[in-house]
Image: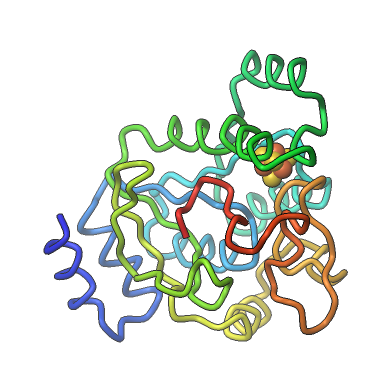
């Protein structure tokens, strides 16, 4: 698998985001899905995928703890970009048991609880949603955080045992916003209020100018711990 992935990355050296999506759509035809968090990068990717491969499954995870602004964006994205984003939910019994055992705000108590919550509300539903796919697309960029500096366009995702495709791997945040404004793509209004990276409401806060863009996520933890289990980096 490693040599296959190396070959893909060599082939895609210097490729645009659209070319990476096109390549992956052909290579994994009918077996590729896009998991969107509705973040700025993912809004760019939805617009591209809608044009390049409108048949691709696009889905999002509703953890049950999202911002109202995120639900509003989900609705407007479907209407404006002509897509139909599937919404995947966590297992209700698992959430019930977790909350009744550890408390409604368990994630603030310790890192084990936070990771348990992310697993039940995100990782397990993602694994379910990816069943039947050999590859998935996501919006990781290298300059997003210290944990993402070695991301490649095509990677092996050892968590989900699938190929992971990162079309925006080389993009800067400035490029993302230029593309959004140029194509009039809807985006989360929280981005205009100091939230560059948006997840669940209780685990996301606004940041100050100059802070790392992911420093508002799980801000009470050390930076190297701040992944939700969907990605190893
Ligand atoms: Fe739970 Fe917070 Fe993870 Fe959301 S980000 S799943 S609320 S721990």
- Point out the image quarter for the N terminus: bottom left
Tell me which colouring the rendered structure shows.
Answer: rainbow
Residue at the spot 74% in from the left edge and 46% down from the top edge: 200
Tag count in the figure? 0
Q: How far from the left and from the top, in percent, is residue 76? A: 72, 53
Q: How far from the left and from the top, in percent, is residue 43? A: 60, 63
Q: How far from the left and from the top, in percent, is residue 58? A: 48, 47
Q: Nearer the viewer, residue 133 or 121?
A: 121
Q: How far from the left and from the top, in percent, is residue 57? A: 43, 44
Residue at the spot 24% in from the left edge and 50% down from the top edge: 29
Q: As displayed, is residue 172 above or below residue 154?
A: below
Q: Quadrant of ligand 1?
A: top right
Q: Nearer the viewer, residue 141 or 58?
A: 141
Q: As displayed, is residue 69 above or below residue 145?
A: above
Residue at the spot 20% in from the left edge and 63% down from the top edge: 5
Q: As displayed, is residue 191 above or below residue 60?
A: below
Could you say which quadrant of the image residue 174 lies in? bottom right
Q: Nearer the viewer, residue 190 or 152?
A: 152
């Amino acid at each position: 698998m490693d040599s296959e992935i190396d070959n893909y990355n060599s082939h895609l050296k210097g490729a645009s985001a659209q070319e990476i999506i096109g390549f992956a759509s052909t290579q994994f035809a009918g077996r590729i899905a896009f998991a969107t968090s509705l973040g700025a990068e993912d809004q760019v990717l939805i617009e591209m995928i809608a044009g390049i491969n409108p048949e691709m499954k696009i889905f999002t995870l509703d953890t049950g703890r999202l911002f109202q602004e995120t639900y509003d964006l989900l609705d407007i994205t479907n209407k404006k970009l002509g897509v139909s984003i599937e919404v995947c939910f966590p297992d209700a019994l698992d959430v019930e048991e977790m909350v009744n055992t550890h408390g409604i705000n368990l994630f603030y108590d310790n890192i084990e609880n936070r990771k348990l919550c992310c697993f039940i509300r995100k990782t397990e539903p993602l694994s379910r949603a990816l069943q039947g796919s050999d590859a998935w697309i996501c919006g990781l960029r290298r300059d997003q955080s210290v944990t993402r500096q070695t991301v490649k366009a095509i990677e092996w995702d050892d968590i989900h045992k699938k190929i992971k495709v990162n079309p925006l791997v080389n993009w800067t945040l400035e490029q993302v916003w230029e593309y959004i404004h140029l194509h009039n793509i809807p985006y989360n209004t929280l981005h205009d209020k100091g939230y560059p990276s948006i997840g669940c409401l209780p685990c996301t806060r606004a940041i100050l100018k100059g802070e790392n863009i992911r420093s508002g996520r799980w801000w009470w933890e050390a930076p190297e711990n701040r992944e939700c289990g969907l990605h190893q980096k």
